[in-house]
Image (cartoon, grey):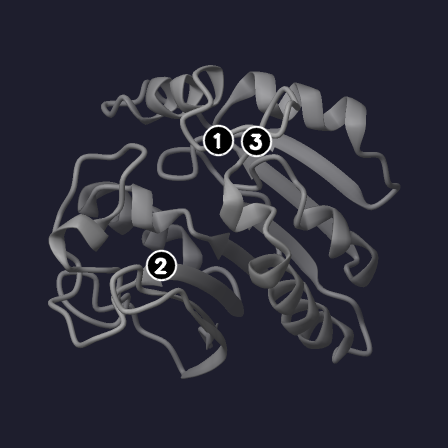
Amino acid sequence: MKNKKTKTPWPTKDVMSQIYEMNLWGSDNSLFYSGEGSHVPSLVNPYINALSLFLRSFKTPLTVCDLGCGDFNIGKELVEYTKTYHAIDIVKELIEFNKEKFKSSNLEFHCLDISLDSLPQGECAILRQVLQHLSNVEVKSVLSKLSNFKYLVLTEHIPVMEFTPNKDIISGQGTRLKKDSGIDLLAPPFNFKVAEAKELLSISLGDSKGKIVTTLYTVF
């Protein structure tokens, strides 16, 4: 597949590269570490169980695009339930590392900026705690590509109590929680159109730390 690339008007690639270089999401002594949300068993295991159940429900396995695959500690557990698993991240060194570490006949890694580059074709897109780090402009750009997928599995870290959704941020390490906000794709300014929305999983981290919610959207 040929990917159309343009020069990014946002510094997201440099920011994400710096996060890994400086271990800003922590470290477990490996070269790349995508944070506790990708490694703590109480957060990871329920998610893998929920996604595995969803993917196994299809007689014909889906082609999945994991948009922001990170260190692939989670994605590696899902590959076997798919026809093809496209694992995508913006950090070139991370993708090259993953290519050497993880091997499967139905697994492909791509270094792409999901807000700018063309995405591989597939039935299901996975976005796990990715949009929460992006500005509203970048979120809108990503969403413009997701109408091509039948399913979207979105995981976001949001406040426990009611909140004003989608307050804008500068793309980077932080999230909207610092502004008592979080991503809601169905609310302005995104107004993402879906046929159905179903909560698959919600894990509370405590009132002050919010909750991590995984939602399955049927796009069409």
Q: Secondary structure at mark 1?
A: loop
- The residue type indicated by label 3 comes to Tyr
Q: Residue at x 33, y 53 (%)?
A: 144
Report crowding for label 3: few under 14, some 14 to 19, many 20 or more residues within 10 A (C-alpha).
many
Q: Is residue 142 above or below residue 100?
A: below
For mark 3, what is the residue?
33
Which of the two discs, 3 and 2, labels the residue nearer the N terminus?
A: 3
Camera-side mark, 1 or 3:
1
For the residues marked 3 and 2, what is the alpha-carbon distance in whole angstroms? 18 Å
The answer, for residue 1, to whether it is visible in the render is no
Vertical relation: 6 (above or below) 170: above
Foreground: disc 1 or disc 2? 1
Disc 1 and disc 2: Cα gap in Å? 18 Å
Q: Nearer the viewer, residue 14 or 181?
A: 181
> Measured along the vertical axis of the image, is residue 62 above or below residue 18?
below
Q: Work out how far the residue at label 1 is from the one at label 3, CA to CA, in angstroms.
A: 7 Å
| Mark 1 or mark 3, earlier in chain | 1
Query: Which image quarter holds the N terminus?
Result: top right
Judging by the rendered image, the residue that carries numbered circle 2 is 157
The residue under the point 32% across, 34% down is 173
How many labels were placed on the picture?
A: 3
- Nearer to the camera, 175 or 206: 206
The residue lying at 14 percent from left, 59 percent from top is 180
Q: Is residue 111 left or right of residue 215?
A: right
Give, as a three-letter code, the residue at label 1.
Gly
- Circles 1, 2 touching at the beta carbon (< 8 Å): no
Badge 1 or badge 2: first in the primary sequence? 1
State yes or no: discs 1 and 3 in contact (Cβ < 8 Å). Answer: yes
